[in-house]
């Protein structure tokens, strides 16, 4: 058997195995077994050299394809306020992206970040390279991403229940904070 047909058969085998979502180890084990069955007398070194590209084939084949992924529970935490518009926007921008990717997101704001709950502040915050924060927060609220604003921080900054209501947000407290950390698969601090 010539090298080209063997290489073509190996590639076909790898392609079929990838479609079945086999692990790299399973693919190599099955390829060696297949080569033994068909009686191909080929040096192991040559075979392994051809199989070296296997992980790269898997990566390349997954690009551009939708793959199933585990839905995560993600808690976003931020204390950035209007003094740094770009950093203030990150929990909302990233929370929106994660929600759109199918993950469950909850945001907990504390410190200066609670002032973003005021419509006037949200409208005035324009992060560099991004739309005004108010637009992003509206999208986050429309996706029903739960936002918590530290109650003590809100009282200290005169943020009222009516400020939170427009975003579907709630007052948070240490107990809620702890429950979110325990609920989350990932905690992202921005």
Image (cartoon, grey):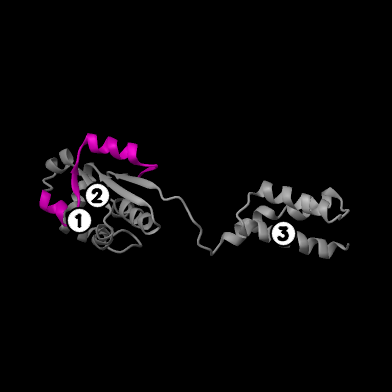
Asked if the residues shown at circle 2 and circle 1 are in contact, with their CB atoms under 8 angstroms apart, the answer is: yes
Which residue in the protein does label 1 denote?
A: 167
In front of the other: 14 or 99: 14
Q: Quadrant of residue 93?
A: bottom left
Asked if the residues shown at circle 3 and circle 1 are in contact, with their CB atoms under 8 angstroms apart, the answer is: no
The image position of residue 23, as x and y in percent, is 63, 49
**Residue 128 visible:** yes
Of marks 3 and 1, the one in the foreground: 3
Q: Quadrant of residue 35?
A: bottom right
Residue at 20%, 56% in the rendered image = 167
In front of the other: 15 or 64: 15
Measure how far apart labels 3 and 2 are at the Cα level. Answer: 49 Å
The tag on residue 147 is 2
Q: Residues within 10 Å of mark 2 (few under 14, many from 20)?
A: many
Q: Residue furthest front?
A: 37
Q: In the picture, which quadrant includes the N terminus?
A: bottom right
In front of the other: 98 or 129: 98
**Residue 190 visible:** no
Which of pointers 3 and 2 lies earlier in the amino acid sequence?
3
Which residue in the protein does label 3 denote?
A: 13
Measure how far apart labels 3 and 1 are at the Cα level. Answer: 53 Å
Question: Where does the magenta region start and end?
Answer: 161-190
Measure how far apart labels 2 and 1 are at the Cα level. Answer: 8 Å
Q: Is residue 165 magenta?
A: yes
Which of pointers 2 and 1 lies earlier in the amino acid sequence?
2
* Secondary structure type for disc 2: strand
* Secondary structure type for disc 1: loop
Of marks 3 and 2, the one in the foreground: 3
Residue at 47%, 53% in the rendered image = 69
Say above or below: 122 vs 176: below
């Amino acid at each position: 058997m010539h090298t080209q047909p063997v290489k073509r058969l190996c590639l076909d085998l790898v392609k079929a195995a990838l479609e079945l979502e086999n692990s790299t180890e399973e693919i190599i084990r099955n390829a060696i077994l297949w080569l033994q069955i068909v009686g191909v007398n080929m040096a192991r070194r040559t075979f392994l050299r051809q199989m070296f590209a296997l992980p790269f084939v898997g990566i390349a084949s997954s690009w551009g394809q939708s793959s199933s992924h585990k839905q995560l529970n993600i808690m976003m935490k931020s204390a950035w306020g209007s003094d740094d518009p770009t950093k203030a926007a990150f929990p909302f921008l990233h929370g929106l992206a994660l929600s759109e990717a199918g993950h469950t997101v909850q945001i907990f704001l504390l410190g200066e970040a609670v002032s973003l709950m005021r419509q006037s502040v949200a409208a005035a915050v324009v992060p560099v390279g991004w739309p005004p924060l108010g637009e992003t927060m509206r999208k986050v609220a429309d996706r029903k991403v739960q936002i918590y604003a530290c109650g003590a921080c809100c009282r200290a900054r005169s943020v009222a229940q009516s400020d939170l209501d427009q975003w579907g947000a709630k007052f948070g407290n240490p107990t809620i904070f702890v429950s979110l950390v325990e609920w989350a698969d990932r905690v992202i601090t921005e």
